[in-house]
Amino acid sequence: MHTLPTDAPAVPPVVASGLDAEPEVEPSYDNLLTEDHKPVERILIEKLYRLLTHTLYASWPGPSPGRPFLALANVGWFYREKTPAVAPDFLLSLGVTCPEDLHVKQGRSYYQWQMGKPPDVIIEVVSDKLGGEDSFKRDLYARQGVAYYAIYDPEHHLSEEPLRTLELSGGTYQSTSRGPWPTIGLGLRLWQGAFEGHQDTWLRWCDAGGEIIPTAEERAARLTERAARAEEAEARAARAEEQVRRLEEELRRLRGESSSA
């Protein structure tokens, strides 16, 4: 979504493994710019950020029992010392945890030398033709070893396909299915419905079984609906039991009258 400056620095080569060597001395965080002071462009995209992160924390148990994950929207990713950060619209990293102190400089961004790895999934939302989602960013994420990259282009600025999902293979991205991806346990889906009262087509996560991962509100609504159905079923069973009881009483009464006759 973010427009690249015309003088964006060239991406220097990285080691063959896709990960930069860990610096011997931790850099000075005072020299790293972690805020660009630029507002989110559009309300729709701001809501999408929240939908992508909220559903995972609210309803996804994680990639495996006891294995944490970090889901961030529009947060700086410092992949190399003395190189400006990039700010993917969304990133997901498995097996890492959020910094304990989010107020200090070390806790403000995704510092790769702290996390020990690049993100596993990055999503970019296209809002114009100037963001570099299909050029500069695509090449950068491939060089840094991001396993899956999704380009969401709802207004077709770069492609007729609203959602393209790519998998890293041999150092370059190749088209792949929308998942669920076995190594991640997640996939992506286009979903028509209402989120926060706004009806639209939304980008949603699906779980390992291909089912849409619900928001906390959707999950609560489902539980309420199930409880209501269970209560109604219980009421029907009670009414049926009462009818049986009355029929049995009527049958005993008729038998008693017949015996008296």
Image: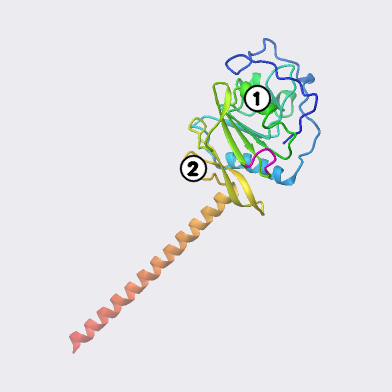
- Looking at the picture, how far across and down is residue 166, in whole percent? 57, 32
The image's colouring method is: rainbow
Between 24 and 39, the residue placed more toward the observer is 39
- Where residue 254 sits, quadrant-wise, is bottom left
- Looking at the picture, how far across and down is residue 134, in whole percent? 67, 31
Label 2 crowd bin: few (<14), some (14–19), many (20+), radius 10 Å: some
- Where residue 157 sits, quadrant-wise, is top right
Report the span colored magenta.
156-160
* Residue displayed at 66% across by 41% down: 153
Q: Residue furthest bottom?
A: 261
Q: State how far apart marks 1 and 2 are (Cα).
A: 29 Å
Mark 2 — residue?
210
* Residue displayed at 51% across by 37% down: 179
* Residue displayed at 79% across by 28% down: 5
Identify whether 206 is placed above or below 192.
above
Identify whether 27 is placed above or below 63.
above
Label disc, if present, on residue 139 of the rendered structure = 1
